[in-house]
Amino acid sequence: MTQHYETILNHYQFTQEDSDILMSLEQRMQPLREEFINGFYDYIWKFGETATFLKNKEVISYHREKIQEWFVNLFCGKYDMNYFIYLYKIGEIHVKIGLPTHYVNAAFTYVRTFISKQLQNDCNNREKLLKELRAVEKIIDVNLDVLTSSYREEELSKFLSMSKGERKILIGLKHFTSYANLLLAGALALVAIFAVSLFSYDVYNMFFSDEEIQKGILTVFGSLLILWAAIELIHEEIKHLQGDGFAIGTFIMLAMAALIRKILIYSLSPSKMHELLIIGLVTVGLAVAYWLVGINKRTLID
Ligand code: HEM
């Protein structure tokens, strides 16, 4: 990939003039490395999960040092094969430690803002300033491109390392999953319609049938529970379609809601004690499963 570095520079219309401008800025940027890194760390620390990657003092001090070097290097004026190899290595290290590309992208906003603020503070020649800003924008974009390309290559290399048959199966499975997900979304919409109908029917029964009002209220309450769980399930499916994990916990919740509805209804008739006991036991079993799924999810996040 590195042999294409000239193509990358061309795509960003990076010229010799840009190189010269950046090199001329090095003298001004070098003394700012300390201010830059302090701001950079304040910025990335607000991501919340930064400490998961920058685990201890040694890693932090190493990273601070390396980022300062990288910052000054932005203005080295020589963007050749070695420079690109250097950038690819940074990208590869980020991929290796599992750093989400989003963090790198977000950190670049700080870099961009910091440099343009400094340039604007120092300059009173508008035309010169515009040229400097343009050159800085280009080199920042090139850096971001190369740093994040390792992520794309990691995905691509996994895919390319598969045999032809494996690739076909993977593509087939991906298609199948997207159709199955659409089917699931349709089925869930139906469940929601049924849940609304059940709720309306129970409300109707409460007022217009001979049923005891006490039983009617509990039945309505039960169907409301199902409606709420169905809405929750649709919400989770939307998140799943947008790329989140599968929410098995919500399915369990829906099953629990349906059983709780039965318990509410049966609790009023003494002849149903046996069924009540069985449903109660199944509900407790589901509650335990729900709790275990929750623990597993929290462990994965930690
Ligand atoms: C502008 C964005 C960033 C740049 C330019 C950058 C640059 C670097 C550089 C130069 C290295 C050292 C590579 C080497 O050892 O040769 C590195 C490693 C690393 N970076 Fe970044 N980084 C950026 C963003 C981040 C962010 C946002 C995090 C964490 C949230 C992070 C976490 C790390 C970690 C954990 C290492 C490995 C440190 C070690 O080897 O112990 N980086 N990065």
Image: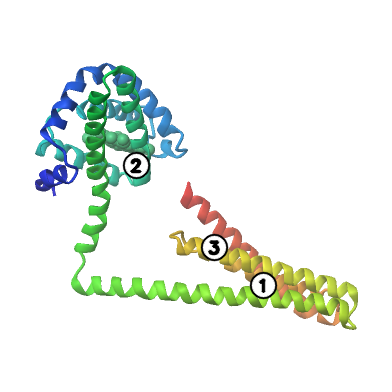
Secondary structure at badge 3 equals helix
**Disc 1 and disc 3: Cα gap in Å?**
24 Å
Q: Which residue is mark 3?
A: 236
Taking 39 as reference, is 268 left or right?
Answer: right
Classify the position of ligand 1 by quadrant: top left, top right, bottom left or bottom right. Answer: top left
Location of residue 8 in the rendering, given as x and y in whole percent from the top left corner: 16, 45
- In the figure, 187 relative to 96: above or below? below
Quadrant housing residue 215? bottom right
Q: Reply above or below: 100 against 225.
A: above
- Snapshot colouring: rainbow
Q: Is residue 88 above or below residue 113?
A: below
- Say which label, 1 or 3, has the lower sequence index: 3
Q: Residues within 10 Å of mark 3 (few under 14, many from 20)?
A: many
Query: Going 58% across and 66% down the picture, which residue do you hit?
Result: 233
Q: Earlier in the sequence, mark 2 or mark 1?
A: 2
**Mark on residue 34?**
none
**In this rendering, the label closer to the viewer, 2 or 3:** 2
Whether residue 266 is visible to the viewer of this picture, yes or no, is no
At mark 2, the secondary structure is helix
Q: Residue at x 39, y 25 (%)?
A: 39
Pointer 1 residue: 282
* Left or right placement of residue 202 versus residue 7 in this view: right
